[in-house]
Image (cartoon, coloured by chain):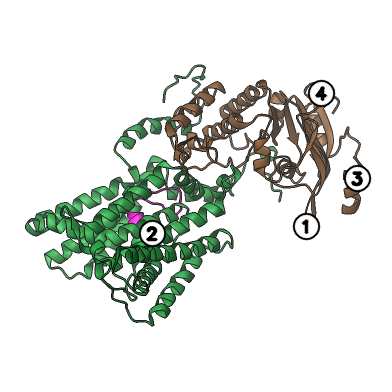
Chain colours: A green, B brown
Amino acid sequence: MTAPAKFEPTTPVDDGRHTDAEEAGGQRGLLKRLGSVTALYTVAVFGAEVLFFSIRAHDRFLTTNNLILTAQNVAVLTVVACGATFVLITAGVDLSVGSVAILGEVVAAKTIINAGGEGVLDAALGIAAGVGVGVLVGIINGVGVAYLKVPPLIVTLGTMLAGVSAAQIITDGVNVPNRTLSGLGNDRVAGIPIIVLVGLGVVAVVGILLHLTVFGRHTYAIGSNADAARRVGINVPGHLVKVYALAGALSGFGGVLSLARFNTTSIGGHQSDPLEAIAAAALGGTSVFGGVGSIAGTVVGVWIPGVLRNGIIILGVQPYWQGIIIGLVLVATVWFDQYRRRVAGGTGGLRRMRLRSTRPSHHPPTTTTKQEGEP
Amino acid sequence: MTTASTPMLEGRGLVRTYGTVQALQGADFAVEAGTVTALIGDNGAGKSTLVKVLSGVEQPDDGVILLDGQPVVFRSPMDAHRLGIETVFQDLALASHLDAAANAFLGRELRRFGVFTAKRAMRRSTMTAFADLGVTTVQDVSAPVMSLSGGQRQAVAIARSAMWAKRVIFLDEPTAALGVVQTRRVLDLIRQIRDRGLGVVLITHTLPDVIDVADRVEVLRFGRRTATFDREDATVELLVSAITGVYSNVAVEAPADATEIDVAGAGR
């Protein structure tokens, strides 16, 4: 924003988009200071939600205990949704996160039991096994997507089905109770549940990974334009495998946390995890077309349904309403965000789709500028 | 090929076949340091394939590539990058959600502690590089490329390549989608890059641009070079007749099948 135009000819013959873009450049600095633009509307929705429940049930809703309870309830999904965010930013999708969480639970519980133990070492072994099986499934997903070129939806649908099956085979379909990790899931340090602190730790680590490292930047680049990433020498398939492996690791770890919290596996559970994770990411401004997203947005996106569930129960409303409300809020938020971007002419999925759809129908006026159609 | 100096990058007898389609049938091409060489030809003449072969995107079935007179083999675009050869593709190959600085350093990020992106340093370097090249239209290198105009995006893509190129830059139809003023800026940028001593290869259908900026013109037809011109000899009429096959000033063997081409390519 420095470097005053030295010999920039101030001709008014320019096309309109140029000046538009320069105006937009002026506004961008302000929006940037307000934080992640994409998550702005989500934060507003979240604020409105909190305000609503605060007014309707302030004595029970706005308490430290209730806040902690909510944080405890959303911890598992937060960890899982962070992984899903990475995958979505690469313009992929991971439907297997719920199954991987179940696998993580089952493998962790079985490992701990087989290690015979109650000790810290056995617990650590169990956690490592739960995360490890997640990495394994993630690598399978990544290889299927990146090297076998099977659409992510199909690959992860396959591992989603296979994952639950594997968990059932391992356990003979009977849930495995185990209390070894209970401290991780239910104990508190300085009044704050350990599971919440662990969730915050995961958020911090993956937030740094996504936003501050070269790994994160390549993740965005691949989702934005995989071809461009490949041409500058980024190992796109290799990176995708790492991203899916990371999502698998976080899902497996989410399963471990779930086991820790409920002291049992939940083979029948986690059915809606993948969709809730995608919804959370999308609420938080992550584009399902790739290239856009943030961990902070996803965290808010997890909290919106979390608080809603909590508030509805406090108000004594039939809890079945929450799906309808979340569904409406999700679509409305994403629609409004994209509408705003389309109007502003900035970044966004809709604009990207529009660019795509107009490119092939581009007819230059003269034959001398015809696009080249070689193989 | 009449000049005395060794070309910076040269292709001799390049052959590239896609199934039954012979995109290159023994094509020759040369670009010298500090010159703009226009590569022209009708659709399907093999221009894009030639660029892909000379920039390492694809490997020739036959023929040799010489860099400063020495034979080289590009197994990937990275090989070509390492030897200072950059390509600006027609689709620009920009990650549109990332900003100009991130795109300029994509795949070659400046790092801190080995893993973190040195964002500020990259922005500063990008601004300096853009200013050196006279790219004044892109003032905010931290704005997503998506928010820039077509001309600005083109400037980002070309300036990025100029930042890294040490020998040759290929520009594939850089002005195809641009207006008059944007085209002029891009041509100015091309001259700027040439004046740094790089070899610039301009692939285009816009013949006035060729006359305007090129020092030499090479005409490709049916996968072979059929004509070369120095700047002063080139006229739009002459170029058109060379593109359409009416005029030729390079000896061309009679059309041959694939096996004969292999022999011809090796024998050159």
The CA span between labels 3 and 2 is 59 Å
- Which segment did they paint magenta? A279-293
**Tag 1 or tag 3, which sits nearer the N-term?**
1
Checking the image for residue A250, the label placed there is 2
**Residue B49 part of the magenta-drawn span:** no
Q: In which quarter of the image is residue B144?
A: top left
**Residue A290 part of the magenta-drawn span:** yes
Q: Dot 3, how many residues are within 10 Å of its Cα: few (below 14), some (14-19), or many (20+)?
A: some
Left or right side of B212 for A221? left
* Magenta span dominant secondary structure: loop
**Tag 4 or tag 1, which sits nearer the N-term?**
4
Left or right side of A278 for B64? right
Labelled pair 3, 2 in contact (Cβ < 8 Å): no
| Residue at the disc numbered 1 | B19
The three-letter code of the residue at mark 1 reads Gly
The CA span between labels 3 and 1 is 20 Å
Q: Quadrant of residue B1?
A: top right
The CA span between labels 1 and 4 is 37 Å
Which secondary structure lies at badge 1? loop
- Residue B236 point in image, percent of width and height: 76, 29
Q: Give the quarter of the figure containing the C terminus of chain B.
A: top right
